Image: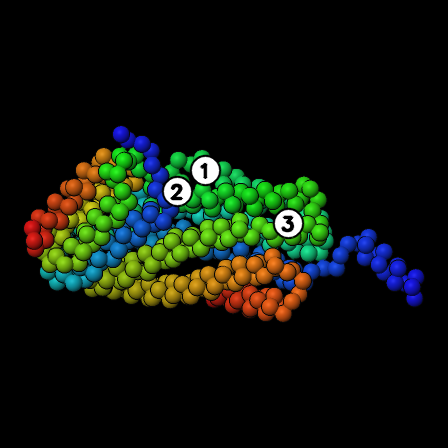
């Protein structure tokens, strides 16, 4: 059963911090891979990093309200998946794989703002699958 | 001689008690502290706008994207305006204590009304989750106390009633600390990281084709980085001042006459506030 559930402040700040860390990881990889990037890939990495930075601002400014199913979606789930994506971003050396993960992460960032828990859950699953498929173990 | 003493005593009785220098000092320093916290809050949304102002030309953002990010900065401004209204209670609390210390009637404070409006907005705003209900309830209690101090003609004899709200002041300071630690400092970090990112973009993409413009921007970015470092240092000093403010208040609660421990704490707080003034002057 769905019910309105507000996140506590500390928790939403954790999500904002995780998004900002993902932006920092993206910058680090752009630096690391810059000699191997096409102009388009370079621009895409800049766009994704920028989007993640403004997501962090948005969460800190207005907070996050989730329509959450009991226990099916927790703040920890969201922070964990963003952290997991950041770890993958730091490790991946193939830019197309990197962009696959970043595209999913940026989409999740927009959905978090919308507060639609069902879509967030779906996108978390998709992001997990994308990380798995694009990392070494995948 | 006896007549003279009697006259002095009667005069004191009419004009009220002697001023309380410890509380006066706390009042003045707390007003300065609240002013400095307002500046941090204003700089939060300013940080977002500074970032956007550089992102647009260097990252070549489209009009649509610029508008979307500008909306985020607007949200940040609305959020910091609400916080500034809440922080008005800090300043009003300091002001009321100063008036009571002089045994003056407490004047009606528009900032208290603004703070109450901000609490109402935060409680009714469906998206607000920035501050928890314990914090907002305590702030509401403190605002009500300050309103009562004006409407019920509080004088120096009621000063203990005001100081007794130490628990509410602890919650108020937790709001200030939460905002500074979890909104302002991360915003500065975001801006600083973004400046590094912009620097890379200028070097990687623009320096060869537009050397003069790129060099100007690179120099500007370095200046912004230095300014952010100064603001971070200033923020640490302000956070320390908040801690000292609470320590002095706890001592005033126990004994607001001038004992040695209180004197030391007040001097320490005043020194910290002096440092806050210097850092603010340097950072802005």
Question: Are dots 3 and 1 on a single chain?
Answer: yes
According to the image, label 3 marks what residue? B161
According to the image, label 1 marks what residue? B123
What colouring method underlies this structural image?
A: rainbow
Q: Is residue B249 above or below residue B122?
A: below
Residue A50 coordinates in the image, percent (x, y): 26, 51
According to the image, label 2 marks what residue? B129
Q: Nearer the viewer, residue A16 or B214?
A: A16
Question: Residue at the location (67% across, 44% down)?
Answer: B150
Q: Quadrant of residue B212?
A: bottom left
**How far separated are the C-alphas under marks 3 and 1?**
27 Å
Question: Residue at the location (60% across, 68% down)?
Answer: B261
Q: Is residue A75 above or below residue B225?
A: above
Residue B172 coordinates in the image, percent (x, y): 50, 50
Question: Are dots 1 and 2 on a single chain?
Answer: yes
**How far separated are the C-alphas under marks 2 and 3?**
31 Å
């Amino acid at each position: 059963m769905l019910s309105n559930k507000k996140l506590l402040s500390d928790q939403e700040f954790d999500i904002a911090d995780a998004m900002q860390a993902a932006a920092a990881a993206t910058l680090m990889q752009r630096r690391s891979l810059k000699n191997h990037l096409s102009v388009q890939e370079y621009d895409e990495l800049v766009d994704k990093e920028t989007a993640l930075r403004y997501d962090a601002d948005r969460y800190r400014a207005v907070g996050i309200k989730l329509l959450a199913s009991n226990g099916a979606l927790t703040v920890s789930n969201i922070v964990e998946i963003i952290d997991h994506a950041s770890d993958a971003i730091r490790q991946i050396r193939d830019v197309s794989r990197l962009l696959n993960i970043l595209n999913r992460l940026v989409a999740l960032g927009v959905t978090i703002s919308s507060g639609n828990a069902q879509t967030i859950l779906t996108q978390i699953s998709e992001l997990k699958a994308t990380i798995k498929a694009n990392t070494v173990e995948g | 001689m006896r007549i003279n003493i009697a006259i002095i005593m009667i005069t004191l009785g009419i004009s009220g008690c002697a001023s309380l220098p410890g509380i006066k000092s706390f009042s003045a320093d707390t007003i300065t502290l609240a002013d400095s916290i307002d500046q941090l809050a204003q700089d939060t949304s300013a940080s977002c706008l500074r970032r956007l102002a550089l992102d647009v030309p260097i990252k070549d953002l489209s009009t649509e994207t610029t508008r979307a990010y500008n909306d985020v900065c607007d949200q940040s401004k609305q959020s910091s305006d609400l916080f500034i209204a809440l922080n008005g209670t800090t300043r009003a609390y300091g002001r009321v204590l100063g008036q009571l210390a002089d045994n003056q009637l407490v004047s009606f404070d528009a900032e208290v009304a603004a703070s109450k409006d901000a609490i109402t907005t935060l409680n009714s705003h469906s998206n607000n989750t920035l501050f928890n209900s314990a914090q907002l309830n305590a702030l509401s209690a403190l605002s009500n106390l300050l309103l009562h101090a004006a409407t019920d003609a509080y004088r120096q004899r009621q000063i203990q009633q005001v100081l007794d709200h130490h628990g509410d002041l602890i919650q108020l300071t937790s709001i200030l600390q939460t905002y500074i630690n979890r909104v302002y400092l991360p915003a500065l970090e975001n801006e600083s990281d973004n400046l590094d990112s912009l620097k890379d973009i200028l070097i990687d993409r623009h320096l060869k084709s537009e050397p003069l413009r790129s060099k100007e921007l690179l120099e500007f970015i370095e200046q912004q980085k230095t300014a952010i470092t100064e603001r971070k240092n200033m923020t640490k000093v302000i956070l320390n001042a908040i801690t000292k403010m609470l320590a002095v208040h706890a001592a005033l609660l126990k004994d607001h006459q001038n004992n040695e421990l209180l004197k030391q704490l007040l001097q320490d707080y005043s020194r910290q506030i002096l440092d806050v003034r210097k850092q603010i002057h340097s950072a802005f």
